[in-house]
Image (cartoon, helix red, strand yellow):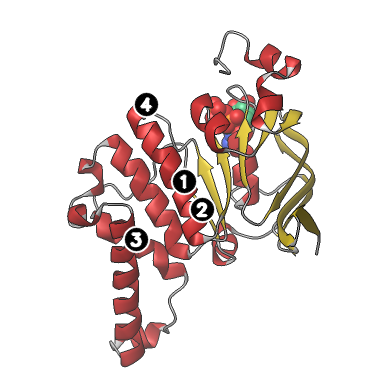
Amino acid sequence: MLIVTRFPKQVYMNILKATKVGHRFGGLRVVEDFNLELYEGDLVGVIGPNGAGKTTVFNLITGVYRASSGSIRFKGTELVGKTPNQIAALHIGRTFQNIRLFRDLSVLDNVRIAHYSQVDYTPWEALLHLGRFRREEQRVIDHARELLAIFKLEHLAGEKAKNLPYGLQRRLEIARALAISPELLLLDEPAAGMNPREIDQLMELILWVRREFKLTILLIEHQMKLVMGICERIQVLDFGVTLAEGPPKLIQNHPRVLEAYLGEVPVK
Ligand SMILES: Nc1ncnc2c1ncn2[C@@H]1O[C@H](COP(=O)(O)OP(=O)(O)OP(=O)(O)O)[C@@H](O)[C@H]1O
């Protein structure tokens, strides 16, 4: 296992290592020679123009797509070839670019359902409502309520998800992703559609969640304020190829990044 020393006396374990990852849709190569290393506690951003391959990278990590080539290792375990459920069971959580809540279920049930890949009872115990089933059910409900309280959504527990304002739906998605107790959290455009005040709150929330849940976070974002404000490292994709990577200051002034973004997104 690779380790890196960032500060004296502290070592950080390698969490994710993507090596020479490639992906094609038919004849179209959308990710090429993608490399990424994440260390425990990292907060890293992936940026790039529309269609650059960012969400595809998330889908490759989470098993939605199977990489055409290369390797993606999570704490040493190869993810390529695993199903999304198997990958979630390894404690890799994610949110989606287009909110994917169960719109007609309550806020509480949205978080509750996410726990079921990890409950510890047999179908028989569930059918007969035996002790272990009841205890597990209570544990799931308690944990779901705890998460709602953390995300200041507890008072909306009984409300249908679709009735929440957009910003709160995004927050609920993050709460739900935390239900599987992730070690690695992937956030796909968490600030999409948010107003500047909501973005400020989201930035604080992401930093707090990372600290509180001891997470490693990889996020895709078009909102440069958020990316430049909280990410320690940024990887820039364009046409599936990494254009640049490094700390925000370096990326902000990188000529190839400015060129790729010209006329699209203000980098400052
Ligand atoms: N299921 C699919 N089948 C075919 N092509 C796809 C599929 N999903 C994505 N693509 C193509 O792959 C390329 C990369 O798409 P991707 O969604 O990863 O980009 P992105 O960087 O996340 O873009 P955006 O910022 O607009 O979300 C695009 O050209 C897209 O049209």
State the quadrant of the C terminus: top right
Question: For residue 90, what is the image quadrant?
Answer: bottom right
Q: Which residue is mark 4?
A: 196
Q: Say which label, 4 or 1, has the lower sequence index.
A: 4
Disc 2 marks which residue? 210
Q: Amino acid at mark 2?
A: Arg
Q: Could you say whether the residue bearing mark 1 is in a helix, strand or loop?
A: helix
Residue annotated with mark 1 = 206
Residue positioned 29% across, 84% down in the render: 134
Dot 4, how many residues are within 10 Å of its Cα: few (below 14), some (14-19), or many (20+)? few
Q: Amino acid at mark 4?
A: Pro
On the rendered structure, is 51 left or right of 7?
Answer: left
The reply to whether the C-beta atoms of the residues labelled 2 and 1 are less than 8 Å apart is: yes
**First along the sequence among labels 3 and 1:** 3
Where does label 3 land, which residue?
Answer: 147
Nearer mark to the viewer, of 3 and 1: 1
**Residue beneath the point at 28% across and 60% down:** 109
Mark 1: amino acid: Ile
**CA separation, marks 4 and 2?**
21 Å
Q: Quadrant of residue 256?
A: top right
Ligand 1 position by quadrant = top right
Image quarter of the N terminus: bottom right
Return the residue found at the far front.
Answer: 8
In the image, residue 149 lies at what x, y percent?
28, 59
- Residue at 51 percent of width and 55 percent of height: 211
Q: Secondary structure at mark 4?
A: helix
Determine whether 252 is above or below 15 in the image: above
Q: Is mark 1 within 8 Å of ligand 1?
A: no
Measure the C-alpha gap from mark 3 to mark 1: 14 Å
Secondary structure category for the residue under label 3: helix
Spot occupied by residue 53 in the image (x, y as percentages of width and height): 64, 32
Q: Residue at x 39, y 55 (%)?
A: 176
